[in-house]
Image (cartoon, coloured by chain):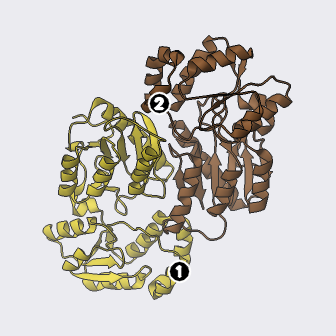
Chain colours: A brown, B yellow
């Protein structure tokens, strides 16, 4: 089940490479066009009956969710709800009010009741998961490792609020915390803060941390960084990125590593025992 | 010592009303022009020697800091440093790297060493401090009180990171957390999130919470809301505001209350025992 971004392409490729018979069900308006190179069906928001039917016709048992959703569905999307969705409507409406995780959780219950098994991106494409240590780019400075530790602490604290997954720390000061705006938007905000003089530093300094929320179901929704994340981090003058090892995906891994090398941005993965030892 | 915004005007008025002999030392480019109705001297960033001289000449002993600083000083401001500042330069440079609180803390040490006593806005203008209970606007709904509790929890959690003082929660979901951008900018961001469809809700819902950081020196820097805060909250469709009783200032109190009544926005103050009982 593919939403936006390049990650679903990586996942579908890895699934085929792993010998699986793949059907990509892409969300219209979000799914990458390259996915149509695989056996493919497009669906609209709310076509839950159609999705279940497509999955049954395909004959597979494993389901993977991948990709990002830029726009959440709202009640204007009700015109595209099919009979499968209408039967679930009371549960979904209650869930939408509670946030995206709950919508996905309810949809998951439905497909599990139909005998399908949810598997994670990490199960189908394990090479995409960040492994502890230096991932790419230059060696982190001592100051960079301190900022990485502070940023991870901040990211974990807001994760515990079920808010965002990311934080930015420059010279030990927390300058941005993610909530509904998403990681890319939060990084761009730091560029605005520099432009307006609200924050300033000299040279490259500061770290973006990204980690999973404590209770996050990694089969449904695993945190992701990609080449664009690294490019944005470099554009606003941050020195590097730290991710939680084993719980964050490197989408477009080769391009992400190339972006880190090209822009001189360190990328490290922390295994929970403090900043990654290089 | 006056920076930007209307709060220093309220504080100077309250000090005069309380029988104090006042000298306002205003930061050029930030201080409100109305302050020049009081005995007044303007200073540039970094004129620490001049500030101490002005204070000594005036003969007073109590010092109050009030007002907001939109732009932090940076090293380009070094041209306006006077001899008093140059003597302190190593300490201040070290402090600037550590963030605003540390700069203020070091400046405070300097003026206390000269025999001055720092007093808080709350000491000079106690009527400006939020008192527990309903402050203004309509009665909060049950859902509003729940959001207020969740938002206060989030604001306290990020305060513990020494990040921001404010959070916004809509239907129990954390949609924005403040760090370096400031409260007004964070509220406006929620308007952008609604406009781009990343968050949505029907009617007025959601709450801005603002509180002091756990270790915050309230004599130096007390959190503030004002009429503009309430107007922005209403503009983005939030239902209300909750502040921490006894630790947040209502700047331009009458206008803040009028803004709450005019825009139908509840303003409540919580005394730490859960959402304010109305």
Q: Position of residue B128 (x, y in %)?
A: 22, 57
The N terminus of chain B: image quadrant: bottom left
- Is the Cβ of the residue at disc 1 closer than 8 Å to that at disc 2? no
> Which residue is identified by label 1?
B76
In the image, is A92 to the left or to the right of B219? right
Q: Nearer the viewer, residue B108 or A48?
A: A48
> Which residue is identified by label 2?
A77
The C terminus of chain B: image quadrant: top left
Crowding near the residue tagged with mark 1, few <14, some 14–19, many ≥20 C-alpha atoms within 10 Å: few
Q: Position of residue B8 (x, y in %)?
A: 27, 68
For the residues carrying marks 1 and 2, which lies nearer the camera in this image? 2
Write down the quadrant of residue B84 in the picture: bottom left
Q: Residue at x 73, y 20 (%)?
A: A62
In the image, is A86 to the left or to the right of B267? right
Structural distance between the alpha carbons of marks 1 and 2? 52 Å
Q: Secondary structure at mark 2?
A: helix
């Amino acid at each position: 089940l593919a939403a936006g971004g390049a990650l679903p392409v990586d996942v579908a490729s890895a699934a085929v490479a792993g010998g699986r018979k793949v059907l990509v069900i892409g969300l219209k308006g979000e799914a990458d066009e390259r996915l149509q190179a695989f056996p493919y069906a497009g669906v609209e928001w709310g076509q839950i009956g159609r999705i279940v039917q497509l999955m049954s016709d395909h004959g597979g048992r494993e389901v993977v969710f991948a990709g990002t959703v830029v726009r959440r569905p709202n009640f204007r999307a009700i015109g595209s709800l099919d009979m499968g969705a209408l039967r679930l409507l009371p549960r979904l409406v209650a869930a939408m009010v509670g946030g995206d995780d709950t919508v996905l959780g309810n949809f998951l219950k439905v497909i599990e009741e139909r005998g399908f098994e949810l598997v994670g991106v990490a199960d189908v494409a394990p090479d995409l998961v960040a492994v502890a240590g230096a991932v790419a780019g230059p060696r982190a400075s001592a100051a960079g490792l301190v900022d990485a530790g502070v940023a991870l602490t901040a990211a974990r604290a807001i994760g515990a609020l079920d808010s965002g997954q990311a934080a930015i720390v420059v010279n030990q000061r927390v300058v941005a915390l993610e909530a509904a705006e998403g990681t890319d938007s939060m990084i761009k905000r730091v560029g605005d803060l520099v432009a307006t003089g609200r924050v300033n530093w000299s040279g490259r300094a500061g770290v973006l941390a990204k980690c999973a929320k404590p209770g996050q179901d990694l089969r449904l929704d695993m945190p992701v960084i990609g080449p664009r994340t690294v490019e944005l981090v470099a554009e606003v003058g941050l020195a590097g990125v730290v991710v939680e090892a084993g719980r964050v995906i490197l989408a477009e891994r080769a391009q992400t590593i190339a972006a880190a090398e090209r822009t001189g941005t360190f990328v490290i993965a922390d295994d929970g025992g403090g900043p990654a030892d290089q």
